[in-house]
Amino acid sequence: MIELKNVEKHFKKPIRGKGVWGMVKTLFSRKYTLVKAVDGVSFTVNDGEAVGYIGANGAGKSTTIKMMSGILTPSRGEILIDGKRPYRNKERNAVLKTIGVVFGQKTQLWYDLPLTETYELLKHIYEVPEAEYKTRLGELIELLDMKPFMDAPVRTLSLGQRMRADLAAAMLHNPKTLFLDEPTIGLDVLVKRNLINAVNALKKEYNTTLILTTHAMSDIELLCERVIILDNGKILFDGTLNDVKHMFGDKRDITISTPSPLDVTAVNEKFGAAIDRIAAEDGGLKTTFTIDALKLHSSELLNFMFNNYAVADVKIAETGIEQVVEKIYADKNLDIDGNAIVNADDTDGSKKDEVNDGTR
Amino acid sequence: MARGRLKKYFIFTKSGIQTVIAYRGRVALWCLGAVINALLMGLLWWAIYEFSPESVIGGYTFPQMLMYVILSAIVFEVINSDSMGTIVDDVRYGLIGMRLMKPINYRLQLGFTSLGSFVACMAIVGIPMIIMGLIVALCAFGLSGIVWYNVLLFLPVTLLSALVYDSIGFLFGQLAFRTQAMFGVSSMTNVLIGFLSGSMIPLAIYPSWAQSILFYTPFPTMVSLPVRLFLGQVPWSELGISVAVSIAWIIVLNVIAHFAYKGSVRHVVVFGG
């Protein structure tokens, strides 16, 4: 189980003066800006749960992942991975043996060695028993289709091959928790789908806890049941995937095509309160009604349309997580069910306090 | 228990050997570099001996000096550990986080990798080039005074040299966590080691007071000690003291490096690297 209790991470940045003279003054200045990259984050992730940890660039996602995997020490608060603190020297190795990490932008493989040798190294590092190692490596090679490039040096692998190899490296010691930080960045559609399928299969087989950070919302939809949205270092939303999709209501876009331009007056009169937006295209031949499915059933609107208009074609689309998250990022001052927490005084995307601690 | 824990690090020695073998071009360039270095230094000393009224300079005849420059060029290449370079790359490309996420000791990982690199370089480059150099010095220039036990002892003493070099490299590599100017640090370290280890000029040429001081520093172990041992110029008593001094320095350097590294890691985990 992963527990984060009121975790904060502050970084000190010297206040830099403008111009050459300003830079010279910075050399002797003791003034710092305290940047709160993570600001009072608390959540619990149960064993086997899959959580999408998302947020705009600079929201504090990677900083949290780095704290959970022991690279960074929290400035305040506590992180417990199965009761152990990964950033404490004495507890660190015990935690590291139970986690696997895949960073889309960085590799954990040994650049000059063939993959087989890299896995051999990892077997020794994580002290995986020989029989277990052989079985799991065999499974991973098959699942991730790695056989063709097992003997190739890592430096010669394509990005797609490298990502598969990195995932296998992270899973080789059967970690209880797998951290995936933008694992599908730069991958083509097919490789991306195969990688996601493989992660899902591994998760199912080994009941691995999954923490995924990504900007690709489709990855979240395919892998996670729960979503935590971070903004300016604070949790903006923590709930199920379904909850996040319906954050602004259960929206549907119903597009009706008609042979002649559509007069929407009658529709407006009947369902006006339940329709959020009406948009016409192609000179009125194609009309999209955005409705709140909690107030109006699609079937009601469609029945009305079929009975009163000559409908040529119909298309119904559910509002995806992509649109919801886009709206959240665009409007940080939302008050969603009174729970939104945003730094109103923040002007540059991070909460800052000026400090003078007398150290450099 | 400790032996069991250390056992897994030998896999890095294997990876160090494999990495050297993986880059045939680099090995070829090392050979070429060592040959050019030995050739130029040989010519320089030939000119010096030609114009000097003395046939023995700093205790060396010309054939001995020729063998000295050949051996020092080879030893300097073979012990050249990549620990500092690895730290610089890991910090610069942000891989240090990935390294810290592994349940292993970073220092031991680099140390054992360097050991592998040393073994491979010595086997592939060092020993064949030493044999060739020895044949040239013996046959063409009449080198004498080479005895088999000194040649055999040369190998473990060179391993000691590699350990000293690696310890200095790891210690100076800690600067990568705090400065971007690692090219300068690396060049400075190499020049310093080249000058004080006897790689550029035999230490016997230096004033006696400088030799006395240098004797108790880690530098002569790196080049001067193994080369002079090969040439049969190190008495047993001096060899014993030099080895003891080297081991003491390896311990001291690693203790300092341990604390420096702890500071570097703290720098990464607290300030984010």
Image: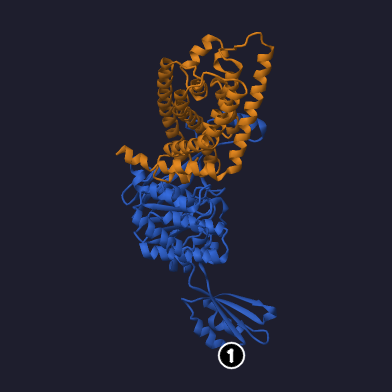
Which of B140 and A30 lies nearest the eye of the viewer?
B140
- Residue A141: x %, y % from top left: 45, 61
Choose top left, top right, bottom left or bottom right for residue A225. Answer: bottom left
Which of A248 and B72 lies nearest the eye of the viewer?
B72
Q: Which residue is drawn at 52% across and 61% down?
A: A148
Tell me the colour chain A is drawn in.
blue
Q: Which chain carries label 1?
A: A
Choose top left, top right, bottom left or bottom right for residue B247. Answer: top left
Q: Quick check: B32 above or below A61?
A: above
Which residue position is annotated with label 1?
A: A308
Chain shown in orange:
B
Which of B239 and B168 lies nearest the eye of the viewer?
B239
- Residue A193: x %, y % from top left: 51, 66
- Residue B242: x %, y % from top left: 43, 19
Q: How crowded is mark 1: few (under 14 residues within 10 Å), some or many (20 or more)?
A: few
User: Is residue B234 shown to the viewer in this render?
Assistant: yes
Dot 1 falls on a residue whose secondary structure is helix
Q: Quick check: A4 above or below B30?
A: below
Which of A327 and B158 lies nearest the eye of the viewer?
B158
> The residue under label 1 is which amino acid type?
Asn
Q: Check the picture and name the quadrant holding the N terminus of chain A.
A: bottom left
